Image: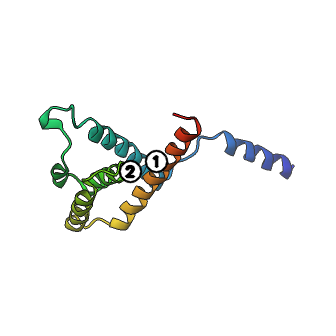
Amino acid sequence: MGGIAKRIESLEQRIRPLEETAAEADRRQFLWRALDAMAHVKRSSIDPEQWRYSVEKLRQQSPSTVATYVCVLRDQEHEDEARAREILEQRAKDERVDLAALEELMDAFAVLASQARAEQHRYGA
């Protein structure tokens, strides 16, 4: 009888939706925000002045938001990357945010971007 109970429990675990941990939710949210930042940077040439991306506008953002822009700027090899990183370091210091934790999220974005480029290359896009 114990074998059947274990099989049922195993099946139930397979059909339950995966429970997202807080860290996974933070990572997912960070990645979505980084994609928003990417769109913002890419359309800066066509956005109206008040909405246009500017590295100096990052000073008013949270360290997490600045980190999303650093990811994008690094990925695009943008000239503002170094300045954005300086702003990130200062904002993290000012708000006492763990820069190492943000770096982990930034690394997750780099992995995702690398995988996307590999897929793009594989399919010739």
For residue 44, which quarter of the picture?
top left
Seen in the picture, residue 107 relative to 9 is either above or below; the reply is below
Write down the residue under mark 2: 75
Number of marks in picture: 2
**Residue shown at 35% from the left, 53% from the top:** 71
Q: CA distance from mark 1 to mark 2?
A: 8 Å
Between discs 1 and 2, the one toward the N terminus:
2
Judge left or right: residue 13 versus residue 110: right
Q: Is residue 16 left or right of residue 121?
A: right
- In the rendered view, would you say 98 is above or below 53? below
Query: In this view, which residue lies farthest toward the left?
Result: 50
Residue at 19% in and 32% down: 47
Q: Dot 1, crowdedness within 10 Å: few (<14), some or many (≥20)?
A: some
User: Is mark 1 in CB contact (under 8 Å) with mark 2?
Assistant: yes
Front position in the image: 42 or 101:
42
| CA neighbours of label 2 inside 10 A, class few (<14), some (14 to 19), many (20+) | some
The image position of residue 106, as x and y in percent, is: 40, 56
